[in-house]
Image: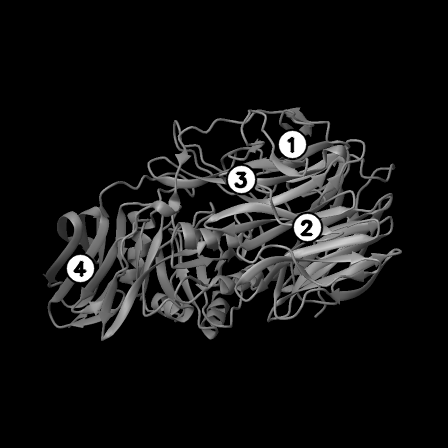
Amino acid sequence: MRTALLAVAVSLCAAQDLRSPLYLKFDHARPDTNRPSVMYQPAMAALPGGPLLFAWTAYANGHERIMATSIRTGSPAHTQLSAGDGVYYWPAIAATGPDSAWAFWPGYDGREWRLIARQYSGGRWLPVEILSRGGTNALRPAAWGSRGRAVVAWESQDGKRQRIVARVWNSGQWSGEMVVSGEDAHASRPAIASEGDAVWLFWDAYRDGRFAVSGRTVAPGLGPVEAVSQTPDGALRPTAVAAGPEGITVAWLARRDVTGARGVIDQWFTVQAAARRGGKWIQLTGPNGGRDIADLRHSLLPEVEPKVIGLYGYQGRRRHPMLVADGSSVWLLWERRIVHDGRGDTAGALCGRKLDGAQWGPARVLHEGLLDYRVQAAGQASGGRIPVVAKGMLQDYRAWDLDLNAGREFRFGEWPGWSPVDVAARPQPQRQSIALSGTTFQLYWGDLHVHSGLTADAEGEFDELALFARDQARLDVVVIQENDFIGRMLTEGEYRYSVSMSRWFTEPGRFVALPGYEWTHRGDDNRPNHRTIMYAGEQTPIVRYAENGANFSELCDAVEAAGGVMNTQHEFFRLTSRACEGNIEVASGWRTFIKNPENIHAGLTAGFKVGFVATSDGHRRNPGIGGGLTGIYAEELTPAAVLRAIREHRVFATNGTRVSIDARANGVFMGQDVLSRGSVRLELRAGSLKRIERAVLIRDGREVHTVQGGGGNVDVVWEDRPGTGFHWYYWRIELEGESPDYPANIKVAEGNLAWSSPHRVTVR
């Protein structure tokens, strides 16, 4: 079947350049069908005195291609860069001369990600080349070029090491791979800039629970590794530029963990920067005398005083600082929502402030009304103008020349009520275990529903979330999965990257990251029927509801064939009797759904065999402390054992506190079927570092027995005679403290509620 590509249309005025008030528009409509299509991850490079080159990934109906367009005096010409359909992601492009450039992108062959390259020379694209060596994954390339030279760097995964490697193009040939980052840290997100003949490469490195930015020269020779960020805050996602006599400036995203609103834990992001002076890296002082150059709390950190205001997603890039050189000055650019709160389908603004020598100018709004603003890496302005790419709310990308000296000033808001917190220092209970039929099961803690920035309205890199889950929140299990369609399609490259990273971060016995995705269909009644799909084996199929006509049976067929499990979510869902149906998400970082239990109880009364889980459903980069946790009883900490426990309902739910629950009916473990002749013997053992106030037994939707607590443990046996027929039971555990009902994806990290998975009991 022919794969449709993204058509490119141009609307320019008679001047035929990007200073036109009209936009260059990349039309995302497919020419051959009405099915959805996606243009994503655009990259750009300005050839000196020549055209603008753009590269992007085109996705349509499970197929992807890398595309490029060259814009000369208003006339576009687009080329397919990839050899054919495949799985691709992250194109990067670098100009090497007035009519020459290189484009790079990772391609997945079903086993590993390879770095693919293609040279543009004399107005045409030469054949593709493979630059990474076999046996490794090559991800997230960054590229630089000038005067016939090019440098490409990427994240190289070799076994359980992730390092930054690079190759240099000079005198018509590529050098061998050089390992740029150190051996002792997880290295990510390369960025490149040049100062004279010296080409610098920067990256963020994670060690001892903290990100920091490092750098070194890679051309004309490999220099020593230097610490660039000198801050107690976490530092990640560097960007760099050279500006005349001021030399190299590097900016990065700074992160502080904070708490407020009676136990909510979140992250406060700012932009910080350093410059190289006299052979040393000097941290630049912000406009207010501190380290922060720009405050990113707007639309990223909730307001909690004088009241908590709901904070929703955004389909732009709120955490991607950019640097542009304008002569001897440097501009720091960043994006934010136009409004702080409200719905996620909100337009954004491109903001900036100028550094002249040691003085930062006022913050300015330079453009607004679009999303996903991008400039070329290590961008150089000309006459105070620079090409910018952004998209509209309908996913149509546009390019134009931005006047850096236009715009209006604005002031940052105040965010009282937040204070620093050491997430990893929170006390944790000892690991519990139980015995079932002669087998010992350990209690593991998981957040089974977390979103990264691959979901259009969420934030956070996959590795950033996985490392936080493992080392700060101290989870055993995490499922970082994306919506199949929210704002735009989850592309094949994005999904396969997520699966690859889940497998790469999994270390049996230490940490398990299960791959999967979220089916996000809404019915004709506009009520969701979402599912979180999880896999443990080699097969990880994705069925997107927007591509299969919302055929739920086809989804179940694919999940069952691959040995997967899926959990329901939200207040509304429609359970089925399919084997892949696993558990009900009774609480999340959005809402405690079981407080309004009609739909949940109706599913139990209808006889559906399910357990209870709780998750963060996190869009706020805080897996494990976002308002929901699942206790998982598994024989061992491996993907297969964890998924088996989820499938067999050896799970229970809490809204954040690690309280252990062992509930049995006639000796049968929770989540299972029980056959009884007359009475039902209910047992509960629960333990917590918090005081347990009481435990309430629910049978068929009614509270039938209450046990008063007062300490850290409850051990109770109670006999019930419910009458013949079908019944169901679960326990609600109430601990000291509170679980405020805050709006949006805002919940305290450690709530005061927990629920055992239900027993299904038939009395004869």
The disc label shown at residue 223, or none: 2
Mark 1: which amino acid?
Answer: Gly
Q: Is residue 305 left or right of residue 111?
A: left
The nearer-to-camera label among 2 and 4 is 2
Which circle's residue, 3 or 1, is located before the other in the chain? 3
The nearer-to-camera label among 3 and 1 is 3
Which circle's residue, 4 or 1, is located before the other in the chain? 1
Q: Cα distance, mark 2 to mark 1?
A: 32 Å
Q: Cα distance, mark 3 to mark 1?
A: 17 Å
The disc label shown at residue 684, or none: 4
Which circle's residue, 3 or 2, is located before the other in the chain? 2
**Label 2: few (<14), some (14–19) or many (≥20) C-alpha neighbours in 10 Å:** some
Q: Is residue 421 left or right of residue 206?
A: left
Mark 3: which amino acid?
Answer: Ala
Q: Circle 2 — which element?
A: loop
Q: Circle 3 — which element?
A: strand
Q: Is residue 363 left or right of residue 560?
A: right
Contact between labelled residues 1 and 4, with CB atoms less than 8 Å apart? no
Residue at position x 33%, y 47% in the image:
592
Question: Residue 758: x and y, percent?
Answer: 26, 61
